[in-house]
Every structure is written in structure tokens, then in C-alpha cells.
Amino acid sequence: MPERRRVLFVTDLAYQARERRYCDEDIFLTSRLRNAFDIALCHPLDAAALMDAFDVVVVRNSGPVLHYQKEHDAFREQAVARDIRVYNPLSGRGDMAGKQYLLDLTAAGYPVIPTIDRPEDLHLLPEAGQYAVKPKAGADSIGLTFLPREQLSDLAYGDILVQPRIDFRYEVSFYYVDDTFQYALHAPDPERRWVLEPYEPTDTDLAFARHFIDWNTLNHGIQRVDACRTREGELLLVELEDLNPYLSLDLVSDRTRDAFVASMTASLHRFLDAQPRV
């Protein structure tokens, strides 16, 4: 029999996320992935010290890295220097690299909530009742505030992003393994982001999400494309999560959950086969 690959599964089982139980999702995933791999779980702060003993480091529900940014940056640097295989690969252009992608996609004309980070660009934002102001390194709505337009000129720009507050009908998330769509969920109530229900996407919806999967150019890994549906029916990108997207696997059917685990297992094998250790 071929040798089983060793997986270091990085998760913060004690992290208290709003309306989500990170620990349950990762307990489930590791219980199923154990059928194909030898798995050990560790906290994100321990990953750098342990990763040499494993074939791949899988970063899952590790919590917002801004809570341990210095250690996370050191982990990334050491993984590259020591030729450690990390899944998702560290080349992601979405949230893994910060919020710059929202500015880049706005400038490139993609269907994204308009985003600026300079006072001289305020004229590029559409009129809105309020504007969202968030840190570039933010996550989980940490540091998010809403201001009227007349107060935007007084902000200390540099480390913040400004967007119009969109009056949307609902949010919807598209989940991918590698470049293959797995399932979609939506939040019918705009005030309850994590109260999700299964969503049947149209071909137009999938074409929207695929634009961002293609833009990110990750050959391997798990991604979540978050969007909002405007009152006019348009989808706009909210977030491209490619670092540690929560998957809400407890809200999908057993069949969908089984298919996701099978896709992730196959993806990990392809990733390991494509990148033999030197």
C-alpha cells in the first residue's frame, strides 16, 4: 500500500465566532479526512514549530490573523524558506493578501462593491446614505464603522477602506474546491449574516463567481466567493475568502457534505502529487 500522507491541520478550536462553531466544522472535517491521511491538529501559533514533520499544512478555521499578525507573517516566511507545502497555497490574491484586491478589482471594473482608500477618490463612490469604513487588515467585521459622506474627508486614510453601504436584498456565498463549484448558501435576512439556507445558483450567478475564482489563479485550495444581491438584482462581490473560509458544512445535505469531503481529499492528493518535496 502507498504510504499515507501526513497532514498538519491548523485550527483554533477555542475561537468564538459569531453565530458559527468553528470547532464543530473542523472536528467533522478531520474525522473524515483521517480516512485518507494521517492527521494532527494544532493551534495556528504552533504551526511553524511543528510543520517540518508533515507533508502538508492545511490551514482551516484558524481565526482572524490580525489577532496574531506577527506570528502569522513569520509562519508564512518560514514556510516559504523551508519549502513547506501549505494548503491553501500562499499565493492567493484574495483575503490571504489583505484587502488590496477590493481596490484592484474596483479599478479593473469588476462587479464589486466600489472601494477606495484615498480622499481624492471619494468622488468615485456613488451616493449613499452611509459609508462603510473598515481596516485594510480587518476580518469578521472587526473595526467596521458606518459614517455619513460629510465625515469621510476627515478620516485618517492609509490603513482603511471606504465603501458605500449597499441596500441589498440578501447575501450569497459560493464555495469552491480548486476551480470546481461545490454548493451555494444564502442569508435571506440582511441583518443575520450567518443564518444561511441552501441556494440554487443560476448559470449567471455561477459565471459571476467564476470570474473571481479565475482572477485569483489558485490551482489548489478552498475558496468562498461572498456577494450581495442589490435591489436592482445585480450581484456585487463582498469578499473573496481564500485564507480560511468557514464552510457552513452543517447547513448542507449529507450528500453535499460527502461530496465536499471527497473533493477536498482529491484536491489534497493532487496538490501533494504536483509538488514533490525536494
Image: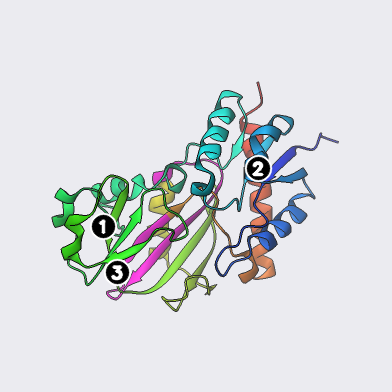
Near mark 3 (Cα within 10 A), the count class, few <14, some 14-19 or many ≥20, is: some
Q: Which residue has dot 1 on it?
A: 114
Three-letter amino acid code at the position of disc 2: Leu
Three-letter amino acid code at the position of disc 1: Pro
207 to 129, vertically: above or below? above
Q: Are marks 1 and 3 in contact (CB under 8 Å)?
A: no
First in residue order: circle 1 vs circle 3? 1
Near mark 1 (Cα within 10 A), the count class, few <14, some 14-19 or many ≥20, is: many
First in residue order: circle 2 vs circle 1? 1
Determine the image quadrant of residue 165: bottom left
87 to 203, vertically: above or below? above
- The percent coordinates of residue 138 (x first, y second) are 42, 52
Determine the image quadrant of residue 232: bottom left
Q: Residue at x 68, y 53 (%)?
A: 262
Q: How far is disc 2 from disc 1 in space, using C-alphas? A: 35 Å
Q: Which residue has dot 2 on it?
A: 268
- The percent coordinates of residue 93 (x first, y second) are 42, 42
- The percent coordinates of residue 17 (x first, y second) are 57, 63
Three-letter amino acid code at the position of disc 3: Ile
Q: Which residue has dot 3 on it?
A: 166
Is any part of residue 126 visible from this angle? no
2 vs 3, front mark? 3
Colour basis: rainbow
Is any part of residue 271 visible from this angle? yes
Determine the image quadrant of residue 55: top right
2 vs 1, front mark? 1
Classify mark 2: helix, strand or loop.
helix
Q: Is residue 116 left or right of residue 63?
A: left
